[in-house]
Amino acid sequence: MVVDTARLPRAAKPRTRRFLTRLALYALLVALCALFLLPLMWALSTALKVPGEVFLYPPRWIPHHLRWQNFSDAWSATLPFQIYFKNSIILTVLPVIGQTLSCSLVAYGFARFRFPGRDFLFMVMIATLLIPPQVTLVPQFIMFQHLGWIDSFKPLIVPSYFATSAFSVFLLRQFFMTIPRELDEAAMIDGCGYFRFFVRILLPLSKPALVAVALIGFFTSWNDFLGPLIYLDSPHKFPLALGLNFFLTTYGGGVQHMALLMAAALITMLLPLALFIFGQRYFVQGITMTGLKG
Amino acid sequence: MATLSESTRALTRREAVRRFHARHREALFGFLFISPWIVGFLVFTAGPMIASLLLSFTDWSILGTAHWVGMRNYTHLVHDSLFWTAMRVTFIFSAISVPLDVLASLLLALLLSQRFRGRALFRAFFYLPELVPAVATSILWIWAYNTHFGIFNYLLSLFGLPQVAWLENSSWVIPSFIILSLWTSGGSRMIIFLAGLQTVPRELLEAAHLDGAGVWARFRYVTFPMISPILLFNLILTTIGAFQVFTSPYVMTGGGPGNASLFYVLYLYRNAFQYSLMGYASALAWVLFLVLLIFTILQFRMMRKWVYYEGEVR
């Protein structure tokens, strides 16, 4: 009996300790999460307010009347965000197609063919990763100006069809190399040409890598600001990033239109958010593929 | 006998010719497949790089003709006080934000690699800021940093702390950008750390635990060496990113107040696209390139001291 009572607290101790550490972990996580999401929640709260409520002090987290109309106003009435959205879609979809197509062609060339200078060229391509884009910025601008491409979408789309993302080529090549060569040989013996093999067999087998490359391309283009800033002048050609900045500068810090501005800012993250929710598996796969094999 | 050997010789010759053709065909197709990159490299990278280097020795502004000025852009740079301001701003920001961001990502990854209910949800929440486009992020934070109505000053007031004029005060503006850069700690960098932590063998951690190693000792002598290559990768990418910060200062402060947040690439942009000083901007770009190159090489050098590669013999 004496032994049992002595043992009891000892047996219970690890359990309560585990419970307490669990509790501490959750408390920490919730606190951190709240801190991280603060600017987003604050923007959402502001986006749903009537103008008079925006500048209340102390601030009110949940507006008296949820004004969802701010979103539709930002979309089409006060601000032409539907036009910016359409431009953003064009300026994202076309480069993503170009990058995925051209990078996989080039990666196939580097992964499967023997030709003189191949390894040297591959090294040159990897070395370009070290060059900051600012170095080529000025001459590229001058070149596009001479071509008369300023204030058009071309400077933001055309380069992507020439495998300009060395990182994507690298990622795809690494992936192609994991696919056994016996497959190539068997296909060739059956009379399958290089191109048919590439389209019919290699690409379908490389879906995870292709999705990763498409995702990288999507975020690069969707978030791009400097490119559109330099190349586009007419407001009706602006993508979302430029439209937001345009609105901010036109309305002097957006003080009067803060609720609309917040609604507009939140609109720009809708598509990335949707992609994230529906493609979460590919997301993590893509990031780790780029990180671990890179 | 003779006919046989002759026929085999003919066969091998035919075989050799066939192989020769196959080789050629293969090489031809190889070049064909990589040709988009060759064209893209020449037109969008190699050509512009040479042009930019040449431009950096001229006084060219979009209008007028270019004159060769030798090293003048580079000597001008040494005496340009704004160049030094931009350098200082960028260096201070990078020196503080890079270690801080990487450390925060690592700590978050360590936290979120524990096993608990709702882990996936928390990971998603911490990732969320990464999904916000840079301009939208800037606008969200302008409002959060607002001196009179912003949420940060309101929080400070709840704790009885003095108000801060975040983006309007020249000594607070860089800390403001450092805090902002911490916001994406839970993004891709953390996911990469998480993937790295998964590769740490459980047996090793358990063995260390049985040998009496505490939490810190297990991290220091097991986890840390195993993830050190990933730490290096994240460190290099974060450094490169920090030196190229542009969108947030452009949108949020325009380099102000005064020139307190004149980041390097912002200054470069001003010279190229506002003052049309293409030659000077090219010189600035090359200096940035060299600085980044030196930093990357240094980080790789130092790597030998602390990065561990499995199976490596020392």
Image: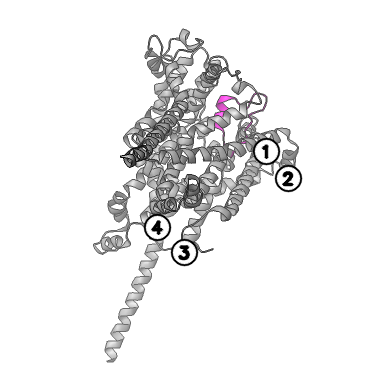
Q: Name the residue under label 3.
A: A116
Do circles 3 and 2 both sit on a common chain? no
Q: Where does the image place residue B183, in percent across and percent down from the top left?
A: 50, 31
- Element type at mark 3: loop
Q: What residue type is labelled 1?
A: Tyr
- Residue B297 in the image: state x and y as whole percent: 60, 51
Contact? badges 3 and 2 (CB < 8 Å): no
Q: Which amino acid does label 3 sit on?
A: Pro
Q: Where A116 falls versus A143 (above or below)?
A: below
Q: Pointer 4: residues within 10 angstroms few (<14), some, or many (20+)?
A: some
What amino acid does circle 4 point to? Ala
Of all chains, the one bearing label 2 is: B
Q: Are marks 4 and 1 on the same chain?
A: no
State whether residue B264 appears in this view.
yes
**Residue carrying label 1:** B280
Q: Give the range drawn in magenta.
A: B243-264
Is B314 located above or below residue B69 in the figure? below
Q: In which quarter of the image is residue B164?
A: top right
Q: Name the residue under label 2.
A: B71
Of B157 and B124, the residue lying toward us: B157
